[in-house]
Image (spheres, rainbow, N blue to C red):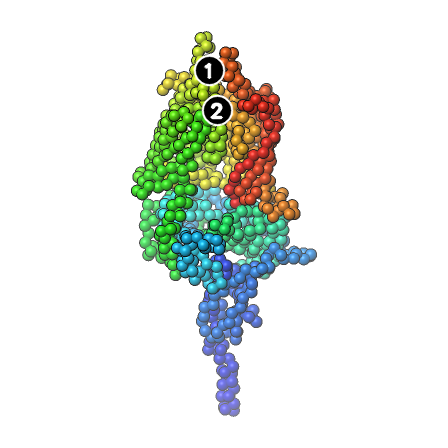
Amino acid sequence: MKQFIKVLTFVLVFFTMPTAMGQTTIKGKVSDSETGEALPFITLYFAGTSIGTSSDFEGFYELSTNARVDSIVAKSVGYDRAAKKVVLNQAQIINFSLDPSSNSLNEVVVKPGVNKALRIIRNAQDNRKRFNIENIEQYEYESFSKVQLAVDNITEKFKKRRIYKSMENLFDTISSLKADSNALPVLPVFVSETLSDYYYNKNPYRTKEVVKATRIKGVGVGDDSYIAQILGSSYQSYNFNENNLYIFDKDFISPISGLSINYYHYALEDSLNIDGKKTYKIRVWPKNKKDLVFSGYIWIQDTTFALKQVSLEISKEANINFIEKIKIQQELKQVENDAWLPVKTRVLIDLVEISDNTLGMIGLYYTSTKDQKVNVKHDLKFYAEKITVNEDAYSKEDNYWDSMRHEKLTADDKKIFNLVDSFKNQPMVRTYVDVVQVLAEGYKPLKNKKFEIGPYITLIGGNPLEGVRIRAGIRSTKDLFKNAKFETYVGYGFKDKRIKYVGDATFVLDRKHWTRIGTGIKNDVDLLGVTDNPFVSSSLFKSLNTLGSTRLNYTFEYKIWAEREIIKGITLRANLRHNEYTFEKYSKFRFLYYTNPFTEELSNKFNTTTLNLEAYISLKQQFVFRHVDRYNFGNLKQPVFTINFTKGLKNFLGGAYNFDKVGFKVWQYNSWGNFGNFEYTLQAGKTFGTIPYPILEVARGNESYVSGIYSYNLMNFFEFISDEYVSLHYEHNDNGLIFNRIPLVKKFKWRFLYNVKMIYGSLSENNTIVFPLDSSYNDIRDDVTQIGQYRKGVPYVELGYGIENIFKFVRIDFIHRLNYLDHENSDGKKVRPFGVKVNFVFKF
């Protein structure tokens, strides 16, 4: 009996030895074979068993078993299934590099019957406002952000260029950073890390970000504070609980928006346990591939129906330019009751090459948050400065980063930092970067980096008044003075043989409450209503309008100005300036006026001295600060109000007129969601007093072949003037909504637009004395006939429509002028009731 027990014990031990004596443990990472990006939420399991797990947000996984297994499988819709052999009873590392599947989500067939996913989606729609981060009164967290940019998609034509030869070995090196040998080679050109504290207050709306540490390496950039401002959390938010997500100036429809069921298909893929809660995994894909929607997966928690995590992408089939793919992965965490905050977000943007001479680009943005808190109140003064970069933010050592970053820096990450340095120091690369910087900035830095010369676009030009014109300028940089900038240019016209010049100085007094002062002097040629118009920024539009314009004048001006943001979102500006306007006879703008109606004395020049006060109100405006300037970086689609008052000061600094001007303007860029974007400008003003007509309200005409957004495209220069007016401009762009649904046409990704422009005004009796009425000046009288007035109760109206995104850059406008068709052009012919104009627009 004892012998039998020994034998039985031996048999049991022998056949159960793997279970009793060994365990198979697998660790690894799952990534995309084409981009190298980590793939979260991928299903992994031992073949032939129900033992499985899913990869975490970084793509890592761990799986253990005591069972006898021979392989591990990774699978996910959108990728080919992959399996790898395992070694029993050992701890081992197995990485997966999954190939994107040729069968996309868009090709799934929807079968008739009850769709279980729709019940979950409708519940998520009903609850999304509860969990919307924008509805939390206050929240704050520490944020760690990492940005990487890399060159990819090297064309055969580009490989033949000399610059590629200088960096070819770096491409080969970088390809080894991928998890699989099939990965396409890429070359990192930019990498950054940013650690910051972010704060939010709902009412009144305030945000604040304090950049505690940042390091930036890249081609053509340095540790400049304006770059650090856009690398943190302030400009990198993705809120799927909103109806739409604003990406590249377009609104993409969230899978749980109020109208999402009209644009998405849904399929319930699985239910699993995440953080101890039952969670539904739902596949989503578009009903129309051209619409601005996502495809991929969303995870919705049971009971609360809160959005837990997403893995979504936008494909190149959507009506968006220069994009191969955008992929967004996000994980959210319930901090308190209805407060759900993002804890990790990863965004991949794959830009296609524009031509055979260019390269593609991959951008990877990653952010994680920790120490999340809600309902912690701060005094409003705390939010006075929206973004601050600590003085020691750029000087943090490696040991600081090792202890403070939210995840460890991998060996590959360290290698990327070194390779970016190697690449940007290549002599030919530096040359190309210098050329690109000159093209982008318009200025070329001198060797000492304290001054820049330019802008190149104005080096040579011409117009009827000056003939051929040359111009050269120089300006100081922050390396000379951190809080001051000086700039000047000198020009010369070969026809009028006159020297022109400009000199400006700007000083920043306070960056916390943005405060600047400045002074300047100018002696140059102007086209009133165009080159002096602050709302017209297009150099192309200005150049083409002055190129053939006959209504040019000389302007001599000196000024002093100041501005200060008194509270967040409200900026006050004051400007005291003196102007001398001269209209030469040979300029073909033969403006004369009676200086003394009783003696019939005529003059071709006049002087004004004005004090202008302006309030600029934009409560959610976002700015990026660079040197002594700040640049608009969006205003969260809120209206912007401008209120101004101008006082004419007679006998002060040579001013000849007493008058008052008041004006009001509201501008807004917003969207109708899936119906497209719209932009409108409503403006009104009135002048009290008698002044020469060139400085009254001159409607912005356009005599060029280029359409202008803020001009009346079939109106002549100086065709309408008034001392009181009201105007409205409205334009709507459907972002492809119509053309996306037309067979054969939808492949072109055209976008339909329409606009309405109207202005109405009147001219009071006391302003008519500025016109020359002496019949002995026949040529002057002929000129005056071109100065029109509005008929009582009849506004000038233009209706336009057009097609945008032709060959990705071209916009064609078809414009109808509805009235005042009896007016004449400067050549004596009737004005056109219909016109076609073109413009060149860069839009995603």
Real-space Cα separation, disc 1 to disc 2, in angstroms: 16 Å
Q: Amino acid at mark 1?
A: Tyr
Query: Which residue occupies the extreme right position in the image?
Result: 112
Q: Earlier in the sequence, mark 1 or mark 2?
A: 2
Nearest to the observer: residue 453 or residue 240: 453
Graded by Cα atoms within 10 Å as few (under 14), some (14 to 19) or many (20 or more), the crowding at tag 2 reads: some
The residue closer to the viewer here, 623 or 98, is 98
- Which x, y percent locates residue 755? 58, 34
**Residue matched to label 2:** 551
Is 802 on the left-hand or right-hand side of 370? right
Q: Residues within 10 Å of mark 1 (few under 14, many from 20)?
A: many
Q: Which residue is mark 1?
A: 593
Q: Residue at x 43, y 52 (%)?
A: 161
**Residue 367: mark:** none
Q: Residue at left 48%, top 25%?
A: 550
Q: Judge whether residue 659 can be spotted in this image.
A: no
SS at mark 2 in the image: loop
Splitting the image into 4 quarters, where does residue 397 fall?
bottom left
Judge whether residue 78 can be spotted in this image: yes
Can you say whether 764 is above or below 234 in the image? Answer: above
On the image, the x and y values in percent for residue 493 come to 40, 28
Foreground residue among 725 and 743:
743
- For image coordinates 45% across by 19% down, the residue present is 585
Rendered residue at 42%/37% (across/down): 457
Locate residue 525: give its quadrant.
Answer: top left
Position in image of residue 694 (x %, y %) = 47, 22
Q: Is residue 825 left or right of residue 138?
A: right
Q: Amino acid at mark 2?
A: Arg
Q: Residue 547: where, in percent of width, then height?
A: 47, 30
- SS for tag 1? strand
